[in-house]
Image (cartoon, rainbow, N blue to C red):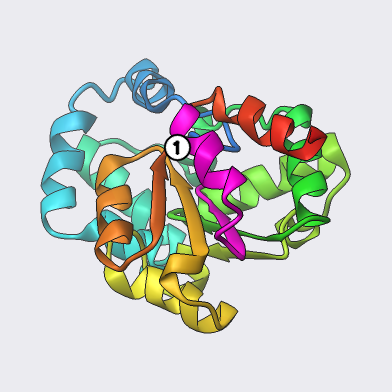
Amino acid sequence: MESLKQLLKERNFKLLLFDFGGVLLNIDFNLSFEAFTQFGIKNLNEQFSQHVQNNFFDDFEKGLIPPEALYSMVRASSNSLLDNAVVEKAWNALLLDIPKYRIDILLALKDRTRTCLLSNTNLIHYNSYRSELERIHGFQSFNQIFHKAYFSHEIHCRKPDAIAYQYVLQQENIKPEQVIFFDDTQKNIDAAKQLGIQAVLWKNEYWTVLKEMLDE
């Protein structure tokens, strides 16, 4: 925590770049696996592992595969006849809440410095939490909370691939060393550091550090 405080105190940045799931949005992957199990699909972990190996989920998060392909994959992998709505409900079960205090901090940060979001996601998840953002918090777009939100299924690249970070750097017209990047996954942090980005492995107590910076 002290190292983050020092990093922010030095003010050697022009952009704060945030991950989404596990940072802004609370998530629990086990809830989706449990939901599928309740529908009688008990081997989904194994089936998903096979599809991870052939890049299905990477391509899904890059927006290269439509949602219909996921529905079909789940039915084929589980030898079931689940309809799309049931698959979607189980798929989205991992998505929890976005606490209001986090949005408040981000809005205050937005008034002080450039802020962006870089998220690995997919269209099904995106439609769910974007709808919840409007229903609960009254925002129609994440671009109302950040200066710019970059979602993998829209920019067709994902972390930890270098091209995802380079895309943001190019769009923001900024140097890597001018960015502080927050993510809760070590491999994404390591990849960002390789490009010269100031990357910080996220801990939830860092919201307090950001709030303290705003109060100074």
Residue at screen point 77% across, 28% down: 101
Answer with left or right where residue 117 lies relative to residue 71.
right
Answer with left or right where residue 134 lies relative to residue 71.
right
Q: Nearer the viewer, residue 105 or 39?
A: 105
Circle 1 SS class:
helix
Residue position marked by numbered label 1 in the rendering: 91
Q: Nearer the viewer, residue 88 or 183?
A: 183
Query: Which stretch did the figure color magenta?
Result: 1-21
* Residue 81 in view, yes or no: yes
- Residue 169 higher or lower than 136, as above or below: below
Residue at screen point 33% across, 53% down: 72
**The quadrant where residue 102 appears:** top right
- Residue 34 higher or lower than 72, as above or below: above
Instruction: Give, as a three-letter code, the residue at label 1.
Output: Trp
Q: Nearer the viewer, residue 112 or 62?
A: 112
List x then y, in percent, for residue 176: 42, 70
Residue at screen point 23% across, 21% down: 42
Answer with left or right where residue 135 lies relative to residue 19.
right
List x then y, in percent, for residue 58: 28, 59
> Dividing the image into 4 quarters, which one contains the C terminus?
top right
**The quadrant where residue 11 appears:** bottom right
List x then y, in percent, for residue 92: 51, 36
* Residue 90 in view, yes or no: no
User: Is disc 1 surrounded by few (<14), some (14 to 19) or many (20+) residues within 10 Å?
Assistant: many
**The quadrant where residue 59 appears:** bottom left
List x then y, in percent, for residue 71: 39, 50
Residue at screen point 71% across, 27% down: 99
Indicate yes or no whether the magenta region holds residue 29. Answer: no
